[in-house]
């Protein structure tokens, strides 16, 4: 059998794009049952967002964590962090954004900078926020919208540091 993420992930993606969330869920479940961590993460996303299923953040968290344990990846770590943020668990949110950065999701440097700027999950520290933003902008890849927001926040924080 070929890679379950490739086979079932492709089927699930096509079904999801067509709006057939039941078929997407079925494909992602089959891929996850065969060890596909990307399928497991995509299945978690359906439950997280309530696409074709009743939204179940607890079940989504369990699936994301299972995917992370099987193969630490950027999407699982970032989505776990977001679920912690939604639940108001700022310390855990910060820790998971750090994990996401460590496995290569450099867009999460922006999230870490916001944590330091606002004192969410960590003591407030504008110098650490600036370092995170600088690291994001030095990264090999971040999305354009992340880079734009990081540049704007960096300018704002440098001005705030200059004024004090």
Image: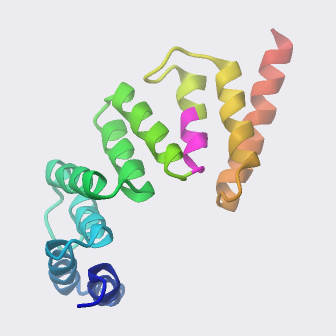
> Which of the two residues, 83 or 3, is positioned nearer the viewer here?
3
Quarter of the image where the N terminus is located: bottom left
Question: Residue 91: where, in percent of width, then height?
Answer: 37, 25
Left or right placement of residue 119 versus residue 64 in this view:
right
Q: Which residue lies furthest to the top in this view?
A: 164
Quarter of the image where the C terminus is located: top right
43 above or below 61? below
Left or right placement of residue 69 versus residue 117 in this view:
left
Question: Residue 40: where, in percent of width, then height?
Answer: 24, 67
Left or right placement of residue 65 versus residue 127 in this view:
left
69 above or below 35? above
Q: Is the magenta stretch mostly helix, strand or loop?
A: helix
Does the magenta portion include 8? no
* Residue in the picture at 65% in, 60% down: 143
* Residue in the picture at 17% in, 50% down: 62
* Region rendered in magenta: 106-112
Question: Residue 9: where, in percent of width, then height?
Answer: 31, 82
Give the quarter of the image for residue 60.
bottom left
> Which of the two residues, 56 or 31, is positioned nearer the viewer here?
31
Question: Residue 31: where, in percent of width, then height?
Answer: 21, 78
60 above or below 16? above
* Residue in the picture at 65% in, 27% down: 129
> Which of the two residues, 108 or 120, is positioned nearer the viewer here?
108
Q: Which colour scheme is used?
A: rainbow
């Amino acid at each position: 059998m070929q890679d379950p993420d490739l086979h079932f992930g492709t089927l699930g993606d096509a079904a999801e794009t067509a709006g057939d969330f039941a078929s997407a869920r079925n494909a992602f479940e089959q891929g996850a049952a065969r060890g596909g961590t990307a399928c497991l993460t995509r299945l978690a996303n359906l439950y997280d967002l309530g696409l074709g299923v009743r939204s179940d953040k607890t079940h989504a968290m369990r699936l994301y964590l299972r995917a992370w344990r099987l193969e630490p990846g950027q999407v699982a770590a970032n989505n776990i962090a977001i679920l912690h943020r939604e639940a108001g668990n700022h310390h855990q949110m910060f820790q998971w954004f750090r994990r996401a950065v460590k496995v290569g999701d450099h867009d999460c440097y922006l999230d870490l900078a916001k944590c330091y700027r606002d004192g969410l999950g960590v003591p407030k520290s504008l110098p650490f926020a600036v370092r995170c933003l600088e690291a994001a902008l030095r990264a090999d890849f971040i999305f354009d919208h992340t880079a734009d927001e990081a540049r704007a926040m960096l300018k704002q924080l440098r001005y705030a540091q200059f004024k004090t």
